[in-house]
Image: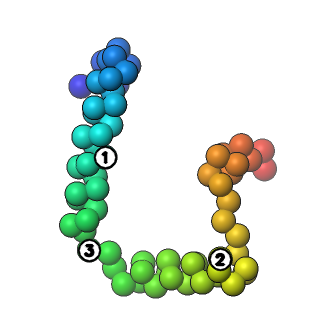
Amino acid sequence: MSIAEIHQLPIEEKFQIIEALWDDLRDRFERMSIPEAHHTLLDERRARVQSGAARLFDWDAVKTTIGRA
């Protein structure tokens, strides 16, 4: 199915496709092994946020600043 064909679909069918894709991605992700280095990095970043050494930003807010720099 091409992008052009997807644009022509009714909204209900688009939501069905999104659900099917999300389910497939979730299932694949759950079967993947995540390297220990990634776990360590995420733990370090969580600790920085919890200690106040780093801040989290809302993605919608960040998107508005991209390209202005």
Residue at 21 percent of width and 67 percent of height: 31
Q: Is residue 55 above or below residue 2?
A: below
Residue at 70 percent of width and 48 percent of height: 61
Q: In this view, does 5 lie above or below 41?
A: above
N-terminal label among 1 and 2:
1
Amino acid found under the numbered disc labelled 1:
Trp
Amino acid found under the numbered disc labelled 2:
Val
Residue 35 horizontal side relative to residue 55, left or right = left
Q: Residue furthest right?
A: 69
Neighbour tally class for label 1: few under 14, some 14-19, many 20 plus, Cα within 10 Å: few
Residue 45 horizontal side relative to residue 6, left or right = right
Residue 59 pos. (x, y %): 62, 51
Q: Which mark is residue 22?
A: 1
Indicate the colouring scheme.
rainbow
N-terminal label among 2 and 3:
3
Q: Residue furthest front?
A: 12
The answer to whether the residues at label 1 and label 3 have Cβ atoms under 8 Å apart is no
Q: Residue 32 carries which label?
A: none
Confirm whether residue 4 shows in the render.
Answer: no
Residue 22 pos. (x, y %): 31, 46
